[in-house]
Image: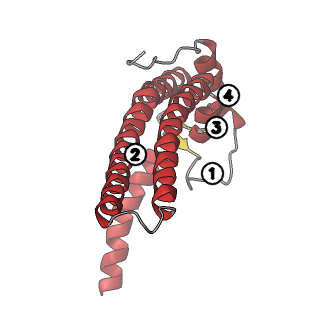
Amino acid sequence: MKVRGLLGLLSIILVPATIFGAAQKIGVIDVDKVYNEFVDTGLAEQQFTQESEQWEKELNEKEEEIIRLQTEYDNLPPIVSKERRQQKLQEIQQKKEEYNTLANEYRNKAVDRQLELLAPISERIVEVINEVAEEYGLDIVINTMQGEIVLYIKDEDIDITTEVLDRLNAGSGTVPQNPEE
């Protein structure tokens, strides 16, 4: 009895969905490909890399200073007083804390900067996908990235990836500058 009820419920749900689904015009897009081949994405990534290299350089300098201080401490002669040793250890500990604080600050700054650089790119991609979908009269656009794999496409014209990429790259080349510059 439960099986009949379940089948009845499924037919009530699936039959209208099938009828309405038949009238839908569907397109597909590989958003991963669009994102990776959009010129502005590469420019934003280059800019981020340049900025993060500077942060990494500063962290490396701090780390080298800690290593130098630790080496000095390890090589202190036995005649150095206990107070002087303790002072050196405190100095090393302070430098480590400064390093950790700076590393956390740069991690947070990196996340914020990536969002700042990539948010306009994502918005632009969605905008152009919507424009192309409207022009093609599409009701649904399926993303073939991240596991949504289309196994069969009867009409290759429903893949709008190239059209979206062409439009995006036609007006690209501008990336937000670092506000600190």
- Please, what is the three-letter code of the amino acid marked with disc 1? Val
Quadrant occupied by the C terminus: top left
Mark sitting on residue 150 = 1
Q: Earlier in the sequence, mark 3 or mark 2?
A: 3
Q: Earlier in the sequence, mark 3 or mark 1?
A: 3
Q: CA distance from mark 1 to mark 4?
A: 17 Å
* Residue mark closest to the camera, 1 vs 4: 4
Name the residue carrying label 2: 103
Mark sitting on residue 33 = 3
Res 23 visible: no
Q: CA distance from mark 3 to mark 4?
A: 9 Å
Q: Earlier in the sequence, mark 4 or mark 2?
A: 2
Residue 155 at x, y percent in the picture: 69, 38
Name the residue carrying label 4: 162
The answer to whether residue 166 is above or below residue 13 is above
- Residue sitting at the far front: 79
* Residue mark closest to the camera, 3 vs 1: 3
Mark 4: secondary structure: helix
Q: Residues within 10 Å of mark 2 (few under 14, many from 20)?
A: some
* Residue mark closest to the camera, 3 vs 2: 2
> What residue lies at 38% left-to-right and 18% top-to-bottom?
179
Q: Nearer the viewer, residue 24 or 49?
A: 49
Q: CA distance from mark 1 to mark 2?
A: 43 Å
* Number of residue marks: 4
Residue 9 at x, y percent in the picture: 32, 69
Residue 18 at x, y percent in the picture: 46, 53
Q: Nearer the viewer, residue 110 or 161?
A: 110
Q: CA distance from mark 4 to mark 2?
A: 41 Å
